[in-house]
Amino acid sequence: MNLENKALSFFRGEMRVPAFLPDATLGVVRSIDSLDLEMCGIQALVMNTFHLMQRPGSSTIKSLGGLHRMGGWERPIVTDSGGFQIYSLIRENPKYGSISEKGLSFQMEDSPRKFNLTPEKTIQLQVGYGSDVVICLDDCTHPNDPFELQEASVKRTISWARRCKKIFDQLMDQKKISENSRPLIFGVIQGGQSRDLRKFCANELMEIGFDGFGFGGWPLDTKGNLLTEIIGYTRELVPSHLPMHALGVGHPINVVASFYLGYDLFDSSLPTRDARNGRLYTLCHEWPFSPGEWKGDWFSYTYIADNKHIKTDGPIFSSCDCLCCLRYSVGYLHHLYKIKDGLFLRLATIHNLRFMTLLTEQLRESREKGRDE
């Protein structure tokens, strides 16, 4: 790990930051393959332990050679533990399961099988999957939850983190994995909008000792605005040489805002979901941007379903070098969308993901230019 040069080093290669990581929740970024991802400039993927243990199942993943071989992806993989899914599933629908100090138990509506996920099990699964960055199990909350619930969440998150780190160290010893070839392990800082709880959680996690940290909890307020104040404060609690992952942050405007607050990694299913729904990313003016131009109205959408695009003979974004923009017109994409052809899903996804990598490349360049100046 070398954030002096703004890069993370892994057994499978180096990842320059800032970096956007698409969510390949079930081992796949929907509608595209690993070669498409490489052509988009994607450096790493995020997959989800909570979902993978259900489908295709841990024994299947092992039989298929681990996540990298199964998905034909040779670059790094980050595996989220499932803390947010616990929140969205159980906190919103208590009938599906329960959370205790031991971990969580749950049962999906479409399955008779009951699952148990403990801090120890989530680390064992992630290491067994061949993950390059494993993330501790955490107890996620909503920013508007009462203080008592936030406090309980922080205490549980810290307790689970200790158990995660303990079993992680044991596995590294048992498997005789050296310091240079082992995966990284990240803790997750919870605490809602309370500065005191965020500080307490960060201090306790740093005492345990992790390679990096994630901002935990829902990152948006009830109006969908980024919680910039608490997100920025949480970054200040962690030394700058340690990477910070803005978990679940993926809207281009929020990625830029979080980058300037000091975050290195971003992930979300939003860009790929927007692509499938015909919301394609573009800018109000061309690359490159100077640092001051990241303010105001710089980002916009092309809504491909709009009839005004029927005869538009030009790319989505002229500064984009993706397959979609280089070879196909907006009018043709509109046609594909209207006839519900699968090619639209692939091309639109490729475009939005290339937009995100171009965005982070521009941020990286603007930071380096600022240093030179």
Image: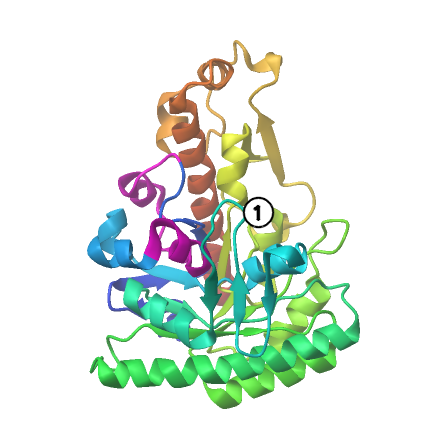
Q: Quadrant of residue 29?
A: top left
Q: Quadrant of residue 96?
A: bottom right
368 relative position to 279: left or right: left
Q: How many marks?
A: 1
Percent of width and height locating residue 180: 25, 78
Give the vertical position of 103 relative to 179 (above or below).
above
Q: Residue at x 34, y 84 (%)?
A: 169
Q: Residue at x 35, y 36 (%)?
A: 32
Q: Residue at x 44, y 79 (%)?
A: 164
Tell me if residue 239 can be seen: no
268 vs 128, nearest the viewer = 128
The quarter of the image holding the N terminus is bottom left
240 relative position to 139: left or right: left
Tell me if residue 52 can be seen: yes
Q: Residue furthest top?
A: 311
What scheme was used to colour the molecule? rainbow
Percent of width and height locating residue 320: 43, 34
Percent of width and height locating residue 299: 61, 39
Q: Is residue 10 on the magenta stretch?
A: no
Give the vertical position of 190 relative to 295 (above or below).
below
Q: Residue at x 76, y 52 (%)?
A: 222
270 vs 287, nearest the viewer = 270
Q: Secondary structure at mark 1?
A: helix
Q: Is residue 46 on the magenta stretch?
A: yes
362 vs 225, nearest the viewer = 225
Q: Which residues are magenta?
A: 31-57
Percent of width and height locating residue 195: 73, 77
Q: Residue furthest front?
A: 112
Give the vertical position of 214 relative to 350 (above or below).
below
Q: Amino acid at mark 1?
A: Pro
Q: Callout 1 environment at 10 Å: few (<14), some (14 to 19), or many (20+)?
A: some
User: Mark 1 sits on what residue?
Assistant: 252
